[in-house]
Image: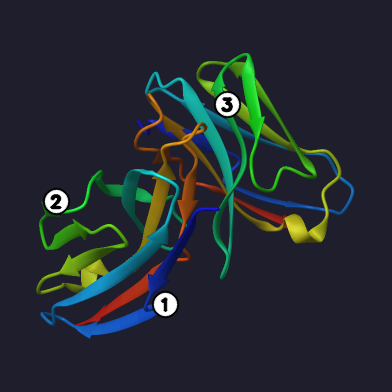
Amino acid sequence: EDQVTQSPEALRLQEGESSSLNCSYTVSGLRGLFWYRQDPGKGPEFLFTLYSAGEEKEKERLKATLTKKESFLHITAPKPEDSATYLCAVQSGAGSYQLTFGKGTKLSVIP
Amino acid sequence: DADVTQTPRNRITKTGKRIMLECSQTKGHDRMYWYRQDPGLGLRLIYYSFDVKDINKGEISDGYSVSRQAQAKFSLSLESAIPNQTALYFCATTERGDTQYFGPGTRLTVL
């Protein structure tokens, strides 16, 4: 059974204070690891897909990295508008292409 | 216009009532999914469909049914709603089973 654990559950940062969110996973043959951002009451918004260990992707202040057991979402010099819940999901290579989601990390960036 | 739309956006109903949630997409994707999101539990898959003739149960399908009326439309029904079905419901679409794109969600309250 695929499993995804995100830590911490919640993170408060001062504006400009860089940090990282963690996503640990176990999966029977990783097909892809996905990061989403979710604002309160809204649908998840796609950020990145990572396919293999060593891969990195960047978008503005966000950088996602992948190893064989975990992924990190690095946030550099965050701004208040980066406040949201960040979701990690894995997709196994077997069959149905289902996503297994973690419970998310709620990020608050204080001005 | 949004690529994935859901109706209604909010619904309050009573125990025992039949409810239908609708999802439409203009992305031309073949695969569609229904998830529910509960505080502290993350996103869980209810049903998914690879095309009009292919519908599959997800992790938590009991108490739900679906209909794929066309490539662009996928409906979720609660035949007899119960209070523990109170949740946020999201529809998602994907092409070739890769990145899933989510709708804005339906907030359902069962009294």
User: Which of the labelled discs sits on residue B49, or is there none?
Assistant: 3
Spatial separation of the CA atoms under disc 3 and disc 2: 30 Å
Mark 3 packing: few (<14 Cα in 10 Å), some, or many (20+)? Answer: many
Amino acid carrying mark 3 in the image = Ser
Q: Are marks 3 and 2 in contact (CB under 8 Å)?
A: no
Q: Nearer the viewer, residue A74 or A95?
A: A95
Tell me: residue B75, above or below residue A58. above
Spatial separation of the CA atoms under disc 1 and disc 3 = 32 Å
The chain to which mark 1 is attached is A
Q: Which amino acid, mark 1?
A: Glu
Residue at mark 1 to residue at mark 2: CA–CA distance: 23 Å
Residue B18 falls in which quadrant of the image?
top right
For marks 1 and 2, the one nearer the N-term is 1
Label 1: state its secondary structure: loop
Check disc 2 and report its element: helix, strand or loop: strand
Return the x and y of residue B53 as percentages of the image width and height: 63, 14
Q: Give residue B51's position: percent from left, percent from top.
A: 54, 17
Task: Estimate how packed mark 1 is, as few (under 14), some (14 to 19) or many (20 or more) residues with alpha carbons within 10 Å.
Answer: some
Q: Are marks 3 and 2 on the same chain?
A: no
| Residue A15 visible at all | yes
Residue denoted by label 2: A57
| Left or right: where A20 falls relative to B41 | left
* Residue designated by label 1: A9
Residue at 13 percent of width and 78 percent of height: A18
Name the residue: 57% across, 26% down. B49
- Residue B20, quarter of the rendered image: top right
Which quarter of the figure is the C terminus of chain A placed in?
bottom left
Residue B111 visible somewhere in the drawing: no
For mark 3, name the chain.
B
